[in-house]
Structures are given as C-alpha cells and as structure tokens.
Image (cartoon, grey):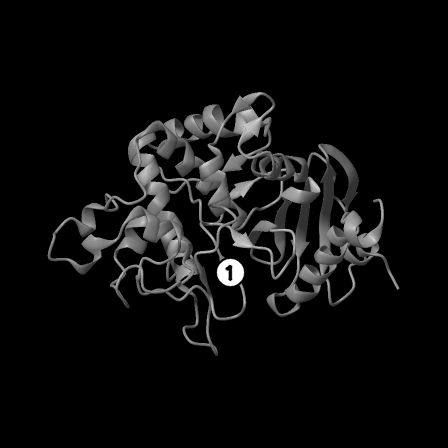
Amino acid sequence: MLDPVDQLVSDAPEIGRTDALLVVHRGDVIVEHYGVEVDATTTMRSWSIAKSMLHAAVGLLVDDGALDLEARAPVAAWADPDDPRHAITLRHLMTMQSGLTWCEAPVHGVPALPDSYLMVYGNDGGPQEDTAAWAADRPLAIPPGTALNYSSGNSAIVSTIVRDLVGTGPAYRSWLRERLFDPLGMASATPRFDSAGSWMASSFCFCSARDFARFGQLYLDGGMVGDRRLLTEDWVATAGRPTGGDGTGAVHTMHWWRFGDNPWGAFHASGYLGQYVVVVPPLDLVVVRLGETPTASRDHVLEALTELIRTFDTTTRGTA
C-alpha cells in the first residue's frame, strides 16, 4: 500500500494530477514535490483559495476600524431600505448566508452554466466587466442569515467593498502587496482584476506552491509573521469556527472550511479541481496540494491528505 505522499503524487485515476505537494512542519519544508513542467517558481491558479486570501484582506480592514462585520453591507444597489437585500450585512456575505439567489454549480445539468461562470465570463464566454455588479443584481431567495448557500458572488461583492476603501485597480493591487503579500514574502502572488478595478477574489490569485504555504503559515501562526502581528488572533480564529453546513457534510467557516471531521481542529482553503491549503495548528503543520482532480474524486484526495496529516500526530503514530 502506498504511503500518503506517494499516493498523492501518483497521479492515479482516483487522485488525479498533482502539480505540487508541499508540507511545512514546524516552519520547515519537509516535503516538496512537483509534477511535469512545474517547479518551485511556477505560479498556479488558486481558484477559490483566493476567497480565503480575501478573508485576510477583510481582517486587515476590520482591524483598521474601516469595516464592521455587523454593519449593513455598503452596496449601492441595496441602499433603498425597502429593498429586502438592504438587510444583508458583511458577516452574511463572509459566512455565505446572504440569502441571494445563486447556483454555484450545475445541478442535474440545470442551469447549463453555473452562476459563478456567468459572473466571470458572461453568457457569450467574454469577460464580465463588473463581476460584483452582476452578483449584487441577484434577488433574494431566502432572508439573510437563514442558511448557507456557497456563492462566489458573495466574494465578488466583498472584494468590491474592499476596493471602495483601498482604491481601484492599481491602488487595490498595491494595497494587497503592501499590506498582505509583501509582509508574508509572497513575491509570486498575482491577483486578477476585472474592468471595474475589483480583485476577482472569488477565483483568481496565481501563486507558487511555497507562497500558498506562506499564506497558510500566517493562519497557523495565529496572524503573526515573525515578531510582527499582521492579523488579530480573534480574526484568525474565525477561519476555523463553523458557521454552517452545505448539506454534503462540508462545514463552512468564514471564507474558509473545516477540514472534514478531523480531531485536530484543522481548517482549509480550497479551490476548484482539488486545490488545498490545510492548516493544522496542534501539529504545527501546513499542507499545500495543487493540481487537477474531478469533483467526483475529491474525497480520495481528502482521505489521502488526512492520512498524511495523521502521520504527524505522535499521539497515534509515534514520532514523525
């Protein structure tokens, strides 16, 4: 039987293609594997890992006093008090409980394209000029705060709320660089912006595997970078605190997820086709897996990642 590392990098049909696997234990890189035509300098697509990076950006502004989770979301399209969306708060958006009508992925083939695709690419496959405006135009399906409905549109709207505070386009890019990426040493981090100057933080921040690991290390270290505090401990704690389930067993927190039913309190950032940044505080561990795995096979990747993490649990496996 293959050990978990070999299993994850085997490119077996049930795992899919692994482009990068990185394990950081006690601050040291102890496993680093790259696939064909990929190396430590290759920047790879985040997909929805970017949502968890947006969590960090919002945390910086909450700490600055510029944003309040409990305040009404400052979205111009919802400004009319008679609009039922007027009641949506920033917390509702961050916990995916805005109540907006949204289908993140096709269900039984209907709709033909998910809302997340249409928000980014439009009906004709061309770029959506203003992703947040498209998302904010969705009507309410249920009252805000009622239930989890995972939605890339929520993230697009949050990103535009950030944009309106820090500046559009180049100013937003510079703010991310100065406040988040540079302090972490994430030199490769490349966010993508729409024509309205908003970071498309639902889906796009290209990074090397090591820079994804640096991001995870920030949360492992409780918001500290060396001896400098970047995020408050209270804010980091929201990444691991459950806020709702999606009906499939997955438990959302606040633009992060709990890592399955694990005994370590691990949580993770995840993206389409099997991108993972897993943070395991009690084991001083960050695991990054990037690649391409069909959605139907992702449980196999999660199982292999869980077994990999388990090898570092000296209470069950001896000294790692």
83 sits left or right of 179 in the view: left
Q: Secondary structure at mark 1?
A: strand
Residue 31: % across, % down? 79, 41
Residue at the far bottom: name it: 108
Quarter of the figure that contains the N terminus: bottom right
Which of 124/101 is in front?
A: 101
167 sits left or right of 283 in the view: left
Q: How many marks?
A: 1
Q: On screen, 159 above or below 303?
A: above
Q: On screen, 180 above or below 281?
A: above
Report whether residue 15 is seen. yes
157 sits left or right of 286 in the view: left
Point 11% across, 57% down: residue: 82
Which of 234/158 is in front?
A: 234
> For the residue marked with disc 1, what is the amino acid?
Val
173 sits left or right of 263 in the view: left
Residue 127: % across, % down? 40, 51
Which of 228/151 is in front?
A: 228
Report whether residue 195 is seen. no
Quarter of the figure that contains the C terminus: top right
Point 69% across, 45% down: residue: 287
Snapshot quadrant of residue 57: top left
Residue 25: % across, % down? 74, 38
Residue at image mark 1? 251
